[in-house]
Amino acid sequence: RGIMEQSSFERGIQNLENELKAAEDKQKKLRQSIETQEKLTTRLKMEEEIFTKQKFELEKKLADIDRQRDDAWYDLEVMKDELEEEIKNSTVIKSQIAARKKDNLEMENDLKRLEDQMRAEDSVVEGRKNKRVLESKLVFLADEMEQLQLELDDETEPELIQELKTSISNISAEIAQVKKQLED
């Protein structure tokens, strides 16, 4: 009976030792699990900090892009307004040029009619009459040239200035012709 009790006691000790070893293994695994969890938590915090920093930088870049976009839209609006103003001014200038061309054409037609009339009168009228007609033509041409010169002095558009200079040059040539006719 004593041997049986001793054997039962040894088995009890053996069972306790096995349970102790199992508890120690469990404790060791639990510590490893806690260490792993701490490492993961530390890593997660680091990644969260990195993410937060990247998010802040991206938000800053996005704000910069929004600001640049707004600036670009403003610049485009300003350019559009300036372009519309230039188109408006261009249309006004074109209409002024067309009106001047029409006026110049009418003046040239008047001068041609006057020349035709004077030629017709030259064949009919002799001597003094012819001289008076030429003198009146000379006065008319001088007045026209003076009028064109006044317009030229006031003009700022290059195309109109060139047209006025051409008209003045044509009238100067006609004045020279009339003077030559008067001398003859």
Image (tube, rainbow, N blue to C red):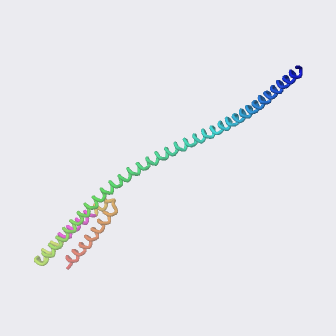
Q: Quadrant of residue 169?
A: bottom left
Residue 112 vs 4, above or below: the answer is: below
Q: Residue at x 75, y 31 (%)?
A: 26
Q: Is residue 139 magenta?
A: yes
Q: Is residue 108 magenta?
A: no
> Which residue is at the far bottom?
184
Q: Is residue 164 left or right of residue 182?
A: right
Q: Is residue 94 left or right of residue 22?
A: left
Which quadrant, please, contains the N terminus? Answer: top right
Say if residue 128 shows up in the picture: no
Q: Residue at x 62, y 37 (%)?
A: 48
Which residue is nearer to you in this view: 86 or 138?
86
Q: Position of residue 139 (x, y in %)?
A: 20, 68
Over which residues does the magenta segment extend?
136-148
Q: Is residue 162 left or right of residue 15?
A: left
Q: Is residue 85 left or right of residue 120?
A: right
Q: Position of residue 23 (x, y in %)?
A: 77, 28
Say if residue 21 shows up in the picture: yes
Residue 59 vs 103, above or below: the answer is: above
Which residue is nearer to you in this view: 125 or 37?
37
Q: Quadrant of residue 6?
A: top right
Q: Residue at x 20, y 79 (%)?
A: 184
